[in-house]
Image (cartoon, grey):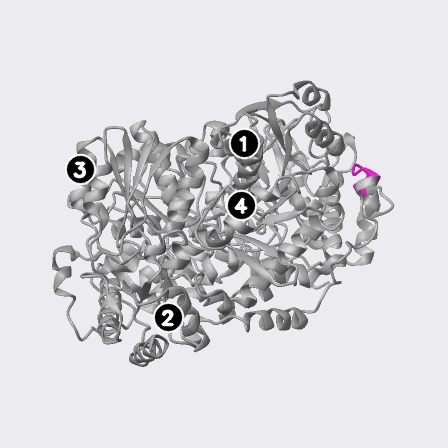
Amino acid sequence: MNAPNASGWQPEMGNAEARTSPTASGDRALMLEEALIFELREPGTTGVDIDEPAAPPLAGLARFLRQDIAALPGLSEPETVRHYTRLSRQNYAIDLGPFPLGSCTMKHNPRLNEKVARMAGFADLHPLVPQQAAGGAFEVINELAHWLITLTGMHGVAMTPKAGAHGELCGVLCIKAALAARGDTRNVMLVPESAHGTNPATAAFAGFTIENIPATAEGRVDLAALMARLGPEVAGVMITNPNTCGLFERDMKTISDAVHAAGGYVYCDGANFNAIVGKVRPGDLGIDAMHINLHKTFSTPHGGGGPGSGPVVLSEALAPYGPLPFTARQADGTVLLIEEQDAAAEHPHSFGRMAAFHGQMGMFTRALAYILSHGADGLARVAEDAVLNANYVLRSLDGDLDAPFGGSGPCMHEALFSDVGLADGFSTLDVAKGLIDEGFHPMTVYFPLVVHGAMLVEPTETESKAGLDRFIASLRSLAQRAKAGDESLKSAPHFAPRRRLDETQAARKPVLVWKGDAAA
Amino acid sequence: MRYLPLTPAERTDMLGVIGANTVDDLFVDVPAAARLTAPIAGLPMHASEMAVERHMAALAGKNLAASQVPFFLGAGAYRHHVPASVDHMIQRGEFLTAYTPYQPEIAQGTLQMLFEFQTQVARLLGTEIANASMYDGSTACWEAVAMAGRVTKRSRAVLCSGLHPHYVSTVRTMAKFTGDTIEWAAPRLEAAADEAGVIAAIDDQTSCVVVQYPDILGRIPDLAAIAEAAHAHGALLVAVVTEPVALGLIEAPGNLGADIVVGEGQSIGVGLQFGGPYLGLFGCREKFVRQMPGRLCGETVDAEGKRGFVLTLSTREQHIRREKATSNICTNAGLCALAFSVHMTLLGGEGLSRLARLSHARAQQTAARLARVPGVRVLNDVYVNEFAVVLPKDARDVVRQLADNRILGGVSLGRLYPDAPDLANGLLICTSEMTTDAEIEALGQALEGVLA
């Protein structure tokens, strides 16, 4: 197969003089700048045909009427489509190439799932229709809930959390409610140093005191330190497995058993479930609660930062405390959506409602289509190929980049590198920005915190071998340039729509809204 | 498997590079007892695109979509016409399949869109600034209560009786764990919103008053009066807007003294989707910016002095602050924010104003028709596009009977307030520019039949 650039095409061909001379428009061929909508048109127009109503507003509304309509321009459809199309071209995306952000699981988003979510019966369904009008929606929720329980080996699932961190909150609140139910005031949550920032933030919100557990030299939770800390004040642990160093926590079951014996609960951050889906059931490891990012393992689109969806699978000990609404299968096989009106009878120990309505239905339909498409065999293959691709990246760069835990054996679905060996003054950031010029999205950088200058690469299973080879070649080249002290790397990216942006200025005096029309 | 590009030969080659014999060797750290050796039991094997589409279409077909029948539901989720171009724009792969814009040099599309969105939201709500969105209106409402606590260093919040009951429940759930005190009472079936009750509940310990505008029964509270009372006690006014289209007709809360304005943005550009994903709107006074939750996009320049945009003030957020963060939130509702922004860009202030007036005219027409149904009383004196009627019997039964006749005839208050029997005969009716004369007449006649 030819590399995509085998034609020899480069972004700025032409002679050197032509390359540096400005164009009258400021644009360069397909490299198009775009103004803000507020600069394209003044308020007072609209791009939608809406009839003028025949009747005036109610007389009683007079004292409430808006004095000045919102000062927002309305663009015609051609202007609107062009504006957003031009903006879209300033974005990198999975559809353009590898997006190897560790811990983020940027995999291909199947378009069937988009089509399914847009079926009128799902997309145009009001959340408060009488239950008789939403039978298919409850079946979707129930079917997805069933597969999530099956894949994780857990007892129940709370479907409503709206994102991963919201799911973490759900799990932690279940722990809090379970402790309260037995009159237990223990309030220490143990969190490994390598955890995602959301873990301590969530536990702190729920009123727990956070204590960090160190990592071992080989990148796993320090079992001895954790065991030594267990006691009557420890409410639980929050562990990511596979962990953020890309390694499976071998002692997970031992940890769970010990935490349970000490009266605590085990929360698992399921952000990295993609590495083990269909291969390992977290329920078999003694987990009490785990959120599942449907936008990671089950491929619902990230959409430039959301929406997510974070159902939480629960053990038998925690399921009674799950939030409302709760879906439960009845003895006759039908599905009951338990809302507030039936909670006293059907789900009396719930800690309450976390959000309006029933959760991220638009993500449920996509995730269900994904699971059915892959099936039991396909999901196991997902984990296997994700792990295979990560190990291929890890081993292909032996001798090029330092892999701090490369000696501890195979990684799971993420390959972790450090900045050890780069020339003085060269950093992980320079390598990341260099990848942008190479046509790739950078890996996750400076996370996990336990590794200096961390570079966490998660290729996912939807990258081809040829694509990985190109990525590896670019990363190897960048590692060599950073080791050799190639100064041009320090000012990368050179070919992106923008050079490095001044984040200090942005934070010092934040400009969060356009004020170009303010009176001078 | 159509989504997995590796071939068996490539897998073999790659294992060779790795130095492993089989893929299972890569799972060596998983204890044997926990490792599944066969495809997980209970799940079917992989399925073709056609088979999955058929299965999902059958499920979708069991639901009654708003577009299929006369439709009058609101109560926090609204049906407005979404221009075709909105969905086309959000399906641009560069938007749909991008991540959070942590590498701003190659994410200016998302970032500029968020900056425009923040400006649109602030101008719509009448606030000085707005963030890049929250999960939904109910979680934004809790975040506003929590933020008011940080600003005022107080922990007693007063919720108006007309706040959406799901929002009330969400706030109460969170407050149980933070120890905040929440004051709230169920609404009464009265024509006017209960400003006096809210004002009477404010004291010098109150962090904020949370007032929905228009409220759950479609009534319009006097925000300026409540703001004045709140400020006199050093409390903040949090206004909650579940139907932002209404702000095309009635004054923006920020212009009436609200300190924080949150809302559900779904009704502009985002479909009903059985309740999610939706779009939390969050605006406030600029002086509170460092206490705000959620992502913020800010303007800056790049190394060549060109204007550009970045995520900013991340020192408030969990990935930097960990347990000291202002909120544990890690995600916004980026794609829903894009849908909102595209729709808002098409509408402009002018189009929004027309949309609100037309939706309101449909509500007037519907109220007039329902007032002619024997036994039905229209509760509200004023409303925008949603109002309450009082029926001579339990509205839950009426709604079910209407659905049997293929009419989605509103949201019963019994569904929303199962513990308040005095509200059981209340029914919320909502209209929009999509409501037709024929639908209004169908609802009128069906109600006459059910109540006869």
Q: Residue lying farthest right?
A: B21
Relative image position of residue B141 (x, y in whole percent): 36, 44
Q: Is residue B296 visible to us here?
A: no
Q: Which residue is mark 3?
A: B229
**The stretch drawn in magenta includes residue A43:** no
* Label 1 close to label 3 by CB (< 8 Å): no
Which residues make up the magenta segment?
Answer: B26-32
Instruction: Using the image as rendered, state which of residue A37 and residue A312 is in the foreground.
Output: A312
Mark closer to the observer (1, 3): 1
Mark 4 packing: few (<14 Cα in 10 Å), some, or many (20+)?
Answer: some
Q: Residue lying farthest top?
A: A228
Mark 1 packing: few (<14 Cα in 10 Å), some, or many (20+)?
Answer: few
Q: Amino acid at mark 1?
A: Ala
Cα distance in 3D space between marks 2 and 1: 42 Å
**Secondary structure state at the residue bearing disc 2:** loop
**Secondary structure state at the residue bearing disc 3:** helix
Q: Which residue is mark 1?
A: A180
Q: Point out which mark residue A348 bears.
A: 4
Placement of B296 over or under B7, stated as above or below? above
Q: Is residue B24 left or right of residue A152?
A: right
Instruction: Using the image as rendered, state which of residue A11 and residue B168 is in the foreground.
Output: B168
Mark closer to the observer (2, 4): 4
On whether disc 1 and disc 3 are found on a single subunit, the reply is no
Q: Amino acid at mark 2?
A: Gly
Q: Point out which mark residue B409 bears.
A: 2
**Quarter-wise, where is residue A127 in the image?**
bottom left
Q: Point out which mark residue B102 bears.
A: none
Instruction: Using the image as rendered, state which of residue B111 and residue B281 is in the foreground.
Output: B281
Placement of A152 over or under B341, stated as above or below? above
Q: Amino acid at mark 3?
A: Ala
